[in-house]
Image (cartoon, grey):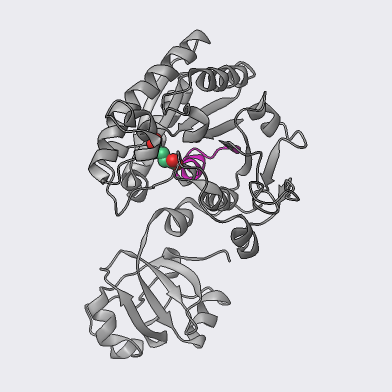
């Protein structure tokens, strides 16, 4: 099996913000067990920023807000983090390979394939890829921001069989267990829907950026990638193999959809940020959703946001409900000029479709 294990900052650092050697040692021993059983494992690790704050003179209570200081902290913390992984993997006879990814590595097809090739080569050599976001040069506007989503995209990238998100709670609860004594663990989730998102929403601890909302978003991406996700407590013994073996009570399991969305569509739906919106009329909505047609200018009511041809945009109905996302073939100005026109009225230099159906994905709701 190919397994992606993501572990959050709060599970990897001590209260003072240092890398928790015991936590890394436990994780590495479990990874080694899985590899000895013949599985391939990619680790997605957080905590570079948290581990770098102390050396820069900050603590978790006076975390700086300036992005450049956080980037600087990550540059320092990432080394401490990797040194710890290197040591503990080596004690288990394994080699670590650091892979730092930025969103653009997954948006551009060539780089996406290159990133996949690197991960496959590492796995093929029996090396454990240890992935993090390239925080030191992350762009505030376009960073992944949380490693949950990054881990789901990595799971998709390598066509993993399972994604395990390790955190400091036992999974998803019916209510916030920190505030409600009656909250109980949800063991199985078939589909992430809006109700669940509203129950589980809200950021988690101070150390990480993820929280439960970003874990649900990650589980959704993984599910559409055909990958089963488990959210479980990092401190539980044998947590990864129990999750992979489907042992009841390990955490919350999100079932994968039977149909894996093709890589390109998944990439459009979840990896590329939307830079604008196209509001379409009910006829166009029907043509897109029911008949899987391309979006033509006649059905476009108006455009919002600032985008150019080839950027990603959301497609919304006149009530503002987002139901699709796609790569637009026209610049915003062309849409402003031509929205509502029928195809034969268009200037010759414009493509016939505003969004071609091959570049569009109907979004899960
Ligand atoms: N990439 C960030 C780090 O290593 C963590 C993001 C997160 O908390 O998910 O510090």
Name the residue: 38% across, 72% down. Answer: 355
Q: Of residues 334 and 76, which is closer to you in this image?
A: 76
Name the residue: 32% across, 86% down. Answer: 339
Residue 232 pos. (x, y %) = 64, 37
**Residue 141 location, quadrant:** bottom left
Q: Of residues 38 and 212, which is closer to you in this image?
A: 212
Q: Of residues 182 and 147, which is closer to you in this image?
A: 182
Residue 361 on the magenta span: no
Quarter the N terminus occupies:
top right
**Residue 47 location, quadrant:** top left
Q: Of residues 295 and 177, which is closer to you in this image?
A: 177
Name the residue: 32% across, 52% down. Answer: 142
**Residue 259 location, quadrant:** bottom right
Residue 97 pos. (x, y %) = 39, 22
Q: Is residue 191 left or right of residue 345?
A: right
Residue 336 pos. (x, y %) = 27, 84
Quarter the C terminus occupies:
bottom right
Name the residue: 29% across, 25% down. Answer: 55
Q: Is residue 252 left or right of residue 346?
A: right
Residue 159 on the magenta span: yes
- Which residues lie in the magenta part? 150-164
Residue 57 pos. (x, y %) = 28, 29
Where 358 sits versus 315, above or below? Answer: above
Q: Quadrant of ligand 1?
A: top left
Where 36 sits versus 350, above or below? Answer: above
Where 38 sits versus 300, above or below? Answer: above
Numbered circles on residues, count: 0
């Amino acid at each position: 099996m190919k397994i992606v294990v993501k572990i959050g900052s709060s599970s990897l650092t001590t209260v003072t913000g240092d890398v928790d050697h015991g936590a890394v040692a436990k994780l590495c021993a479990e990874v080694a067990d899985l590899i000895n059983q013949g599985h391939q494992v990619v680790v997605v690790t957080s905590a570079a920023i948290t581990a770098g704050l102390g050396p820069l003179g900050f603590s978790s209570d006076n975390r700086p807000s300036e992005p450049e200081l956080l980037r600087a902290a990550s540059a320092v913390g990432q080394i401490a983090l990797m040194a710890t992984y290197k040591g503990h993997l080596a004690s288990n006879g394994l080699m670590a390979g650091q892979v730092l990814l930025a969103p653009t590595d997954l948006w551009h097809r060539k780089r996406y394939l290159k990133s996949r090739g690197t991960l496959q080569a590492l796995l093929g050599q029996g090396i454990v890829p240890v992935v993090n976001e390239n925080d030191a040069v992350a762009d505030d506007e376009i960073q992944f921001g949380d490693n949950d989503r990054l881990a789901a995209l990595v799971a998709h990238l390598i066509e993993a069989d399972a994604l395990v998100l390790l955190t400091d709670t036992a999974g998803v609860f019916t209510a916030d267990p920190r505030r409600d004594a009656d909250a109980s663990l949800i063991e199985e989730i078939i589909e992430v829907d809006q109700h669940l998102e509203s129950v589980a929403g809200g950021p988690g601890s101070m150390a990480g950026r993820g929280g439960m909302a970003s874990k649900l978003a990650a589980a959704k991406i993984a599910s559409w990638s055909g990958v089963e996700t488990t959210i479980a407590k990092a401190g539980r013994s044998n947590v990864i193999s129990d999750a992979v073996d489907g042992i009841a009570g390990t955490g919350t399991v999100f079932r994968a959809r039977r149909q894996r969305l093709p890589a390109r569509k998944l990439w459009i739906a979840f990896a590329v940020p939307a830079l604008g919106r196209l509001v379409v009329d009910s006829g166009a909505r029907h043509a897109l959703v029911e008949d899987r047609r391309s979006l033509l200018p006649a059905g476009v009511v108006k455009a919002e946001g600032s985008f150019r041809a080839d950027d990603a945009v959301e497609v919304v109905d006149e009530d503002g409900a987002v139901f699709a996302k796609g790569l637009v073939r026209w610049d915003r100005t062309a849409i402003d000029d031509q929205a509502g026109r029928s195809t034969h009225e268009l200037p010759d230099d414009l493509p016939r479709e505003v969004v071609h159906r091959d570049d569009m994905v109907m979004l899960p709701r």
